[in-house]
C-alpha cells in the first residue's frame, strides 16, 4: 500500500528540547516536503527536497532543519523548539518537481510549552 | 513570490445545491493548480487538478475552471452531499513549490 508515514502523531515538549519528526514514503518519490498548518493560514511550506542530498527552503524555514540521506526518509528537526512552533505538521511526497503532490502523511500535532 | 488568495473562507449550502470556491494567483508562471479536500482530523487529499494548457476539467460532481488571463481558478461542486463537508484548499505550483490558499470550510446541511 502506497503511504507516507509520520511519527510521532502527537508530541508535547518544552521550549529548547531538541526533537525530530520522522517521515518515510514507500513510493520511491523524488520529491518530499514539510508543511505546517495553522488556523486561518492554510498550509505553509517549511522545507522541500527534490532528491537525495538536495534540500531547499520553503516559505517558513526559520527554526527548522531537514536532511535527505536516503530517498525514502525526510526527517524534520527542531533544534530548539519555541512555543510559536506549536502547530500541525504534514509531510508529503510526490513525483518529479512537486507538481504531483498526491500523498500526505497523517500529520503530527506538536505542542511546545 | 507566488501568492494565492482563496474565497470564501466559509461556505454553507443546502444539500443538493451547488458550491463554488474561487482562488486567484499572482505569478503568471504558475502552471499547475490542484485542489485538496481535508476532512476533520484527516490529512489533505488531492481531489482534482488542472494544468495551465486546459481551461476546464470535470470529474463526476466536481469541476475546476482556469482563467489564465485573469489568473484565477475555481472549484465547482454540484449536487452537494453532507459528505462533501470539509475544508478545501486550492494551490498553485511555481518552480519547485506548491503555494496553498488559506482554505474554505464547506458545510452542507441536510
Image (spheres, rainbow, N blue to C red):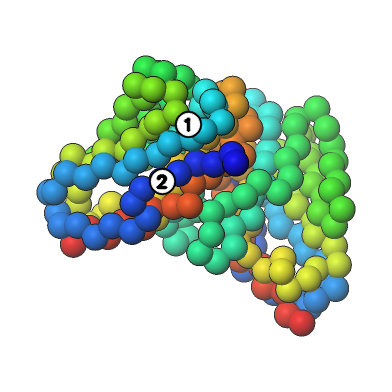
Give the camera-side residue of B1 and B44.
B44
Give the residue displayed 67% in from the left and 69% down from the top. Answer: B85
Q: Residue A24 lies in what quarter of the image?
A: top left
Give how far across and how far down residue B43 sits, in percent: 53, 54
For disc 2, the marked residue is A6
Crowd tier of the residue under label 1, counting other residues whose Cα lies within 10 Å: few below 14, some 14–19, many 20 or above: many
Give the camera-side residue of A2 and A38.
A2
Q: Residue B3 lies in what quarter of the image?
A: top right
Q: Is residue B62 left or right of residue B98?
A: right
Observer able to see residue B99 = no
Give the residue displayed 48% in from the left and 35% down from the top. Answer: A25
Give how far across and how far down residue B78 sits, in percent: 85, 62
Give how far across and how far down residue A50 sits, in percent: 48, 22
Give the residue displayed 26% in from the left and 38% down from the top. Answer: A77
The answer to whether tags 2 and 1 share a subunit is yes
Chain letter, disc 1 residue: A
Give how far across and how far down residue A45 sits, in percent: 44, 40
Q: Is residue B52 left or right of residue A109?
A: right
With respect to residue B22, does B97 lie above or below? above
For disc 1, the marked residue is A32
Q: First in sequence: mark 2 or mark 1? A: 2
SS type, badge 1: strand
Which mark is in front, 2 or 1? Answer: 2
Give the residue displayed 79% in from the left and 39% down from the top. Answer: B67
Amino acid at each position: 500500500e502506497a503511504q507516507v508515514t509520520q511519527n510521532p502523531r502527537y508530541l508535547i515538549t518544552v521550549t529548547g528540547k531538541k526533537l525530530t519528526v520522522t517521515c518515510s514514503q514507500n513510493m520511491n518519490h523524488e520529491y518530499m516536503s514539510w508543511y505546517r498548518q495553522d488556523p486561518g493560514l492554510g498550509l505553509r511550506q517549511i522545507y522541500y527536497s527534490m532528491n537525495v542530498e538536495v534540500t531547499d527552503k520553503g516559505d517558513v524555514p526559520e527554526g527548522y532543519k531537514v536532511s535527505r540521506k536516503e530517498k525514502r526518509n525526510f526527517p524534520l528537526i527542531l533544534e530548539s523548539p519555541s512555543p510559536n512552533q506549536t502547530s500541525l505538521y504534514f509531510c508529503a511526497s510526490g513525483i518529479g518537481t512537486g507538481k504531483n503532490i498526491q500523498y500526505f502523511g497523517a500529520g503530527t500535532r506538536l505542542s511546545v510549552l | 513570490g507566488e501568492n494565492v488568495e482563496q474565497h470564501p473562507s466559509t461556505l454553507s449550502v443546502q444539500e443538493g445545491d451547488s458550491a463554488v470556491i474561487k482562488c486567484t494567483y499572482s505569478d503568471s508562471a504558475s502552471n499547475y493548480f490542484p485542489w485538496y479536500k481535508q476532512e476533520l482530523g484527516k490529512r489533505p487529499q488531492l481531489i482534482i487538478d488542472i494544468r495551465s494548457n486546459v481551461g476546464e476539467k470535470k470529474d463526476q460532481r466536481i469541476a475546476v475552471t482556469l482563467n489564465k488571463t485573469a489568473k484565477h481558478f475555481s472549484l465547482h461542486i454540484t449536487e452537494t452531499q453532507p459528505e462533501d463537508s470539509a475544508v478545501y484548499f486550492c494551490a498553485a505550483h511555481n518552480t519547485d513549490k506548491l503555494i496553498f490558499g488559506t482554505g474554505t470550510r464547506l458545510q452542507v446541511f441536510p
